[in-house]
Amino acid sequence: MVLLQTRQSRSDRVYRDPKAPGTVPWTTFRDVIILLCVRWYLRYSLTYRDLEEIMAERNLSVDHVTIWRWVQRYAPVLNQRIRREIRHHNRSWRVDETYIKVAGKWAYLYRAVDSAGETIEFMRSPKRDLIAAKLFLRLALSAGGPSPRVINVDGHPAYASAVADLKQSGELDGAVVAEPRLI
């Protein structure tokens, strides 16, 4: 059984007063619809045409170009507002790596978490050496937030050398201590 839906034409749209509550000035759609489309686009791997189809299923005629304009206009605003609410990691890091199989090949998964268990950064590497450890620590330091006060590492000797090199180059605070964890 095929269900037919009629789409709203441009002449059927109601233009809202820009000063009315719940509207974005000079837009046809309520702010809830705009926010929903932008959020779905950013959160899920949907195309603009997918969102156009989803809105059509809800009897809203929204062109994919309109959704693209909304994303271009409101995504930076959402990012700015959400960044204030994100919990930043603390200054005590735990860094380790594990051996995983990805697509039939073995690789190392480096990860850094803070003492509250929040993930700071992770990286996959084919090797477990000084270069990979240094690259991972640089990546974790560039993630934003406060620099670590202490870095707890496992017994891998590359971490001590990587921390010393990063201190010497000035990328890491000189007061940071790399303490090996007893497992």
Image: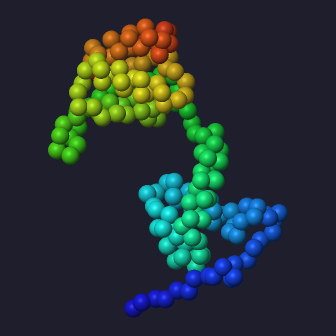
Residue 34 visible to the viewer: yes
Q: Write the residue at 43% across / 8% down.
A: 168
Left or right side of 96 for 150:
right
Q: Position of residue 118 (x, y in %)?
A: 46, 35
* Vertical arrangement, residue 181 with respect to residue 36, above or below: above
* Vertical arrangement, residue 79 with respect to residue 63, above or below: above
- In which quadrant of the rendered image does the C terminus lie? top left
Q: Write the residue at 49% across / 54% down.
A: 43
Most foreground residue, 46 or 108: 46
Q: Write the residue at 56% across / 86% down.
A: 6
Left or right side of 47 for 146:
right
Q: Tell me how many marks there are.
A: 0
Q: Farthest left residue?
A: 104
Residue 182 visible to the viewer: no
Q: Quadrant of residue 26?
A: bottom right
- In which quadrant of the rendered image does the N terminus lie? bottom left
Report the colour scheme.
rainbow
Q: Position of residue 81 (x, y in %)?
A: 65, 44
Left or right side of 58 for 177:
left
* Vertical arrangement, residue 165 with respect to residue 146, above or below: above
Most foreground residue, 132 or 152: 132
Q: Position of residue 141 (x, y in %)?
A: 46, 24
Q: Position of residue 48 (x, y in %)?
A: 50, 64
Q: Farthest bottom residue?
A: 1
Left or right side of 15 for 53:
left
Q: Write the residue at 83% across / 63% down.
A: 19
Most foreground residue, 100 or 137: 137
Q: Quadrant of residue 70?
A: bottom right
Most foreground residue, 76 or 117: 76
Q: Quadrant of residue 69?
A: bottom right
